[in-house]
Amino acid sequence: MTPEEYDGPDASNFVKVVRKLRKRLRQIQRLETCGRDLTTEERIKLECKNNIQRELREILAEINRRDESFNSSVDVNKEINLETDKEDSHELEPDDQHEEKLEKEKDCVFQNNEYTESVVVAAPVEQTNVTSSKVKRKILHEWKSLPMFTKELEGHHDIITSVDCDGNWLVSGSQDTSVKVWDLNSMDEVRNMTGHSGCVTCVQILNNCESDRIWKVNSMEFKLLVDADGETLLNKQKLLLTSSLDCFIKLWVIPDGCCVKSIYIFSPLTAMLYSSNLLFTGTDSGKLVVCDILSGSLVHESIIHTQEISSLKWHCNHLVTTSFDGSVKVWEATCDLHETAVSHMLEMEHLFTEVLSVNESSGLIAGRHIHCVVSWNDKLIIGDDGTNLKVVELDSGNITRYPNHKLCSGFTNSMFTYKNMLFATSYNVDTGNGAINAICHN
């Protein structure tokens, strides 16, 4: 359907076409991030991305030009939002829609030939009647006044799937199968590690205590390893864990880039979390695999989701798992995970008990991919293919929704918390543009 074929008052065909185009764009986005080799047919679909986006822009622009009242009468963003009709019927806007829930700073900041356009979300994630409008405006003004600069680190040849930083080091993993170490002081690449043969899905820098524990247990083994200068690695402290679709977990020394241990899991790995000697990994089939990183032995494996496990997070004494099957599960530890794990297989009930399952019956959309979850102020924040962040009360499982996108064709695939701040990505399916929203909890 071209703009010329739009007849004005009858918007039904328009709605169907835009819905179809957005569906194709979502399919293309999933292909771009699947991390595997694409078929010829799938590559052809990817080549159509720019044409689909251009067609969508032309249709929307023509509709707005011919009938300015169309948006207000049909409410385009809600009417044509892919697979959100059900969710729109019960979307919640907290605190009278937060009179200042979304502010976009138009002033551009230039320094050292670097440019950034700041996007500030001043909507607190938790409803409160205590915070006054005056305080909200003050917070918003402070964020608008902050100079924000960006620095692009060039080096990867495909989509970056995971990053982690600690002290002076930033580590990034990519679909190009490489892991890179960056010096945060100079912003230079200091090491390129190419031990994986598949998409790198997760990277995690271990803290000093975790690194020391592993060094002590494996000291005799690590004595045989030397760095690029021929020196032994025993005096090195920083250790890095990586997971990949090649089924391998690898342990590295950074910044030297030497791989000191490899563990084969027998399934493509899509999520990873290290805690208290235990390495938790999620697979593309929904299986949870637990290993003892000190011995490299398998402790447990079981299917806990029906599709790919997308993220693993630790919250107090609970393990939180999310999946592309559209569910979030919370597991309570039934043993002391700080003790050295045994070298034999354990049943699930000896490790965790499922205490909460958030799914379609709880208000989530069936089949909608859940990409990420963070723990913030004793609540779980969920990012998925929808336009809203979902806030889950752990005691009841109740869900409240808060907008994370200006339009209704976006999704959230990454979040990060720091003190009272939540940072969430926002991806516009229509245009392919991304943003980072900063949300403040007062």
Image: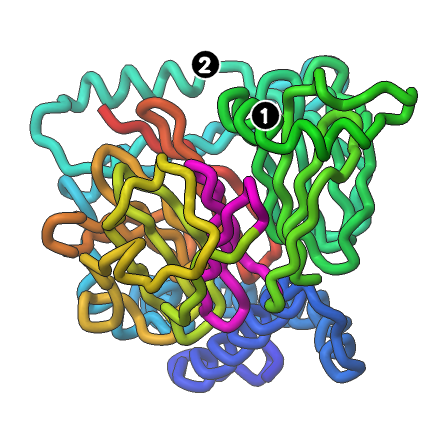
Three-letter amino acid code at the position of disc 2: Ser
SS assignment at label 1? helix
Q: Is residue 358 left or right of residue 102?
A: left
Visible residue check, residue 152: no
Q: Which quadrant of the rendered structure holds the N terminus?
A: bottom right
Image coordinates of residue 302 in percent, x first then y, are 41, 68
Which stretch appears magenta? 268-296
How far from the left and from the top, in percent, is residue 30? 59, 67
Find the residue positioned furthest to the right: 229
Residue 351, above or below 283? above
Confirm whether the magenta stretch covers residue 282.
yes
Magenta-highlighted stretch: main secondary structure? strand
Report how far apart the C-alphas of labels 1 and 2 lie in the structure. 48 Å
Toward the left, the furthest residue is: 129
| Image mark count | 2
Amino acid type, callout 1: Lys
Please tell me whether mark 1 or mark 2 is closer to you in this view.
Answer: 1
Q: Secondary structure at mark 2?
A: helix
Q: Residue at horizontal 79%, vertical 34%?
A: 258
Q: Which mark is residue 216?
A: 1
Across and down, in percent, residue 298 comes to 51, 57
* Residue 151 falls left or right of residue 367: right
The residue drawn where x is 35% and y is 33% is 439
For image coordinates 8% across by 30% down, the residue present is 129
Q: Is residue 191 visible?
A: yes
| Label 1 vs 2, first from the N-terminus | 2
In the drawing, what numbered circle is on residue 145?
Answer: 2
364 sits to left or right of 308:
left
- Tell me where residue 358 sits by quadrant: bottom left
Q: Is residue 97 above or below residue 132?
A: below
Q: Nearer the viewer, residue 78 or 400?
A: 400
Residue 263 in the image: state x and y as whole percent. Answer: 65, 53
